[in-house]
């Protein structure tokens, strides 16, 4: 079997890393895989580490002529059994290109965001099936009663927990240890793209409210909001408590060296960092929003807090920092839960069923 993965986003986040895990997992099972992505994309740079072959396609928009021709050529010559698209432009281009062939591959799309009411035609006609990471995301798509339920299926992210546990024991990224040494010792790690909905600006307000001098808020990620986050940290007098770690290649090693992993998102179809952290037994405090409650149970495997509620977040973090034993007990229960529910081998079995 041959599977063509596509990704038009230039950024690197949980969705892109999950794509690479899926591709490597299928390759290890004997499947042939290939990735289509733009030349200037972070996933293309990382693909070699996952031993995933890459073909460059620009995907500048949903009907980009040269991308349509390039994708059609790949489909004709390589003849994949299935195409799995991960973002908007590549999904549209692949759907159109495939329908110009006399015999097309099975078309599937990963959908992790949906703002507003979805268009039924996209889900009922354009793709054979749309895969979403959570029951919450499936409910969002089925809010339009004309969307056929059989066309929407949940495929949770798969995580190789043995691999991330091994990586957690490795050194931190070069230079990060030295940078962290300049900040206070108690680390609250927030691993996410620097975008509005990830809640970095809210977290800064929470930290200003707590005024714990021994706290270091580790901002692990890149994105367009970095300037605004830096400005707000300075305005709140938190420059000595906020470490901008940039894109961290070995997040498990950073999680393992953190007191808490926080996820203060205001919108989150599911989220990955809280799952990986719990898989390592690291305590988690996260927003009660979107699909996150499917991964964290309040006061049983972690703490859930209303999104954007600065006083509530302040109380939750103060309690978590003052009760490390209870938080570690929550994390131990969470470890067993996520390792059972998000095991990579199990998720790959489900993916194969959708692709076949």
Image: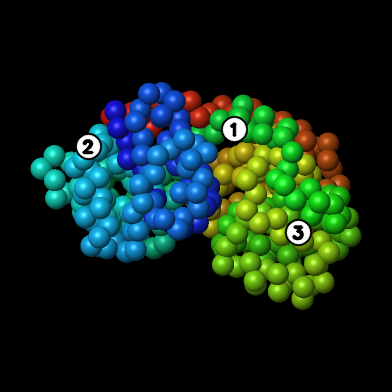
* Residue at 35% in and 58% down: 58
Mark 2 or 3: the one toward you: 2
**Viewer-side residue, 175 vs 252:** 175
* Residue at 41% in and 23% down: 29
Q: Is residue 305 visible?
A: no
Quadrant in the rendering for residue 333 = top right
Locate residue 295, reporting x and y percent: 58, 40
**Viewer-side residue, 195 vs 50:** 50
Position of 121 with respect to 33 (left or right) is: left
| Marks 3/1: CA–CA distance | 28 Å
Q: Earlier in the sequence, mark 3 or mark 1?
A: 3
Give the residue number, with chain letter if any, for mark 1: 338
Q: Earlier in the sequence, mark 1 or mark 2?
A: 2
| Marks 2/3: CA–CA distance | 47 Å
Q: Which mark is residue 243?
A: 3
Whether tag 3 and tag 1 are in contact, CB under 8 A, the answer is no
Position of 202 with respect to 159 (left or right) is: right
Where disc 2 sits, the SS reads loop
Q: Which mark is residue 79?
A: 2
Quadrant in the rendering for residue 27 = top left
Mark 3 or 1: the one toward you: 3
As drawn, the residue found furthest toward the left would be 102
* Residue at 41% in and 55% down: 39
């Amino acid at each position: 079997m041959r599977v063509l993965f596509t990704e038009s986003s230039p950024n690197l986040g949980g969705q892109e890393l999950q794509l690479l895990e899926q591709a490597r997992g299928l390759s290890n099972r004997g499947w042939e895989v290939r990735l289509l992505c733009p030349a200037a994309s972070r996933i293309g740079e990382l693909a070699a580490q996952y031993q995933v072959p890459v073909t460059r396609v620009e995907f500048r928009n949903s009907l980009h002529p040269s991308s349509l021709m390039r994708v059609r050529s790949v489909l004709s010559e390589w003849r994949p059994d299935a195409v799995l698209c991960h973002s908007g432009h590549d999904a549209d281009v692949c759907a159109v290109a495939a329908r110009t062939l006399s015999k097309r591959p099975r078309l599937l799309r990963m959908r992790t965001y949906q703002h507003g009411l979805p268009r039924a035609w996209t889900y009922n006609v354009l793709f054979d099936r749309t895969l979403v990471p959570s029951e919450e995301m499936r409910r969002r798509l089925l809010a339009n009663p004309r969307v056929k339920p059989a066309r929407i299926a949940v495929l949770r992210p798969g995580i190789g927990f043995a691999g991330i546990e091994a990586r957690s024991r490795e050194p931190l990224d070069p230079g990060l240890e030295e940078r962290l040494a300049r900040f206070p010792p108690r680390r609250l790690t927030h691993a996410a793209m620097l975008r509005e909905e990830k809640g970095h600006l809210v977290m800064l307000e929470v930290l200003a409210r707590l005024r714990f001098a021994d706290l270091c808020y580790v901002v692990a990620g890149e994105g367009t909001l970095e300037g605004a986050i830096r400005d707000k940290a300075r305005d709140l007098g938190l420059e000595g408590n906020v470490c901008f770690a940039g894109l961290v290649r070995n997040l498990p090693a950073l999680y393992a060296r953190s007191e808490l992993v926080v996820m203060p998102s205001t919108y989150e179809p599911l989220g990955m960092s809280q799952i990986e952290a719990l898989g390592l037994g690291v305590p988690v405090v996260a927003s009660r929003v979107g699909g996150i409650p499917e991964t964290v149970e309040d006061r049983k495997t972690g703490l859930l807090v209303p999104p954007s509620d600065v006083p509530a977040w302040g109380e939750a973090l103060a309690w978590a920092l003052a009760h490390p034993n209870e938080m570690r007990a929550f994390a131990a229960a969470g470890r067993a839960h996520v390792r059972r529910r998000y095991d990579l081998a199990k998720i790959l079995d489900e993916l194969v069923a959708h692709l076949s």
